[in-house]
Image: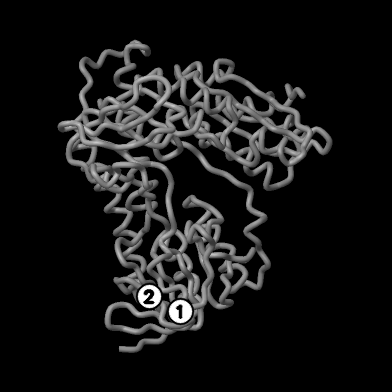
Amino acid sequence: MNRRFDAIVIGAGQAGPSMAGRIAAAGKTVAVIERELVGGTCVNTGCTPTKTLVASAYAAHLARRSGDFGVSVGTVGVDFAAVMARKDKVVGASRSSVEGWLRGMANCTLVMGQATFLSPTSVRVGDDVLEADHFFLNVGCRAIIPDFPGVDQVQTLTHKTLLELDALPPRLVIVGGSYIGLEFAQIFRRFGSSVTVVEKMPRLIAREDESVSDAIREAIEAEGIKVRLDAECIRFAQSGADIAVGVNCAAGEPEELGSHVLLAVGRRPNTDDLGLDAAGVKTDAHGYIVVDDGLRTSVPHIFALGDCNGRGAFTHTSYNDYEIVAANLLDGAERRVSDRIPVYALYVDPPLGRVGLTEAEAQAKGHKVRIGVRPMTRVGRAVEKGETRGFIKLVVDRDSDAILGAAILGVGGDEAIHGLIEAMAAGVTASAYTRVVAIHPTVSELVPTTFEELSP
């Protein structure tokens, strides 16, 4: 059966449903095609489930520390089945909310199934052919399964299948010491697993400044997480009931044994089964859809939003992609993705909030910088809460006084960073920020003071 719409959205992740909502509200017909679960990665296998687990893990951690606050709670236990049931409930409610919105939306049709382009203006879903004047691709990414020796001979987990476990792993080895790997490492350590992180690079989260990497490593090692860096001989083999993960051929124990192994070494776009060649849509060497500054693909009426365009890897960048495209198409605006300031967070404890350039990135771009650093041991709010790991770090251009970037690693860092995000978006200089009056006692109140203490 052939069906025609004004627009078709492929993928019901963060950007897709909102894009459909704007199109439908404009009185145009739109189909949203989703092959698996409405809500995409964030709702089903990303932010929502993982941050729900982070909250449970933090509750267990704080309960174990209750004596530090003069509170006695006795033996602390973790009911893993109850933890996972809570996660499933939160995820289910979120997914149902998005799906209900789409199904009840006037001018919108939700179609479940795999979409494959037949031409620049049509796709096949099952036995149906759907045609439209505009297409919006919001198909996301999936975990990379690296071609390590022996990886096909053992059973490994991805971030998706790890969330489906019904029993706590006794010994979890995580291959990959970046954002996904570190969050799961701390979560499962706090639940009671023995955890080892294996990382190929010489330090964790190598894109961050070395001081941030070192502080995070110290924090997770203090909780009993083992970290193996410079892992140049990563390989896998069955060892009885365990999996042997080869680490290093030169120094230290040659391998780590785990009952379970999580591969957290990156993600790849879900673009290889869309039939993009039939539509004339170009991709790069890694499979990401090539887009211009307005997120238009090589085919003018087809747009790519979210992770699949390689211009951002977060829920908030996906949603901003929708805002840019909707504003340009429907409001006559001229917004550009290159105007976006990079912002993100790492949800270990303490959390890391980041905006703009790191010190190393700023220097690599030719900036002469001034740096402001204040340890959390000098932040009253952190001391009062008994959570003094981390620091505030600010990067400022020496000549223009522009704020180039910041990192807040510490209690509330993922929230406190927003004052700096908004200041950078508004073009506020470092000197102007020193005149801000902030609420006491908070983490944010020390940011203006840190700007007063900049040094070369």
Task: Return the residue at label 1.
Answer: 278
Please indicate whether residue 228 sits to the left or right of residue 401 in the image: left
Quadrant holding the C terminus: top right
Q: In x, y percent, where is residue 331?
A: 62, 72
User: Farthest bottom residue?
Assistant: 2
Tell me where residue 103 sits by quadrant: bottom left
Compare residues 139 and 84 and report the one nearer the observer. 139
Q: In x, y percent, where is residue 450?
A: 68, 24
Residue 87 seen in the current view: no
Please indicate whether residue 74 sits to the left or right of residue 140 in the image: left
Tell me where residue 254 sits by quadrant: top left
> What residue is drawn where x is 45% and y is 64%?
138
Please indicate whether residue 298 sits to the left or right of residue 396 in the image: left
Q: Amino acid at mark 2?
A: Thr
Separation of residues labelled 1 and 2 (CA atoms): 9 Å
Q: In x, y percent, where is residue 81?
A: 18, 37
**Other-residue count near label 2 (Cα within 10 Å), few / some / many at <14 / 14–19 / ≥20:** some
Label of residue 116 in the image: 2
Quadrant holding the N terminus: bottom left
Q: How is the image coloured?
A: one colour
**Other-residue count near label 1 (Cα within 10 Å), few / some / many at <14 / 14–19 / ≥20:** some
Tell me where residue 77 sits by quadrant: top left
> What residue is drawn where x is 23% and y is 46%?
164
- Helix, strand or loop for disc 1: helix
